[in-house]
Amino acid sequence: MLKQQKIFFDFLRFCIGSAKEIPGSLKKVDWKELYAIAQKQALLGVLFHGIQRLPKELAPEQKLLMQWMVMAEMIRKQNIRLFRIP
């Protein structure tokens, strides 16, 4: 398994609560690549939930963080519309 894919799965376990501790592998993360994997797997919102739980020094750089936040908000609004009961 590729290094960034392993980091992705480590972080995904943290994001969904399966792992309580912040993965040590996040120190070596390429956030842009992790974003691309999450986008391809339609998990941007799930991983953003985990990013919100990280200390500032482990979070992605500001520009990518803002992009991720915008996408997570769009997903949230889309889900509200999708699951609205008529």
Image: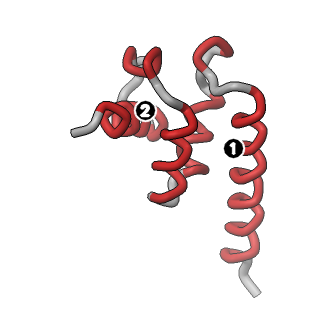
Q: Quadrant of residue 74?
A: bottom right
Q: Amino acid at mark 2?
A: Phe
Left or right position of 59 against 39: right
Residue tagged 1: 68
Left or right position of 81 against 43: right
Q: Residue furthest top?
A: 57
Q: Residues within 10 Å of mark 1 (few under 14, many from 20)?
A: many
**Residue at 50% from the left image edge and 29% from the top image edge:** 30
Q: Quadrant of the C terminus?
A: bottom right
Whether residue 35 appears in this view of the structure is yes
Residue tagged 2: 11
Q: Nearer the viewer, residue 32 or 79?
A: 32
> Does the CB distance between marks 1 and 2 fall below 8 Å?
no
**Considering only vertical position in the picture, is 52 above or below 47?**
above
Q: Quadrant of the N terminus?
A: top left
Foreground tag (1 vs 2): 1
The kind of secondary structure element at disc 1 is helix
The kind of secondary structure element at disc 2 is helix
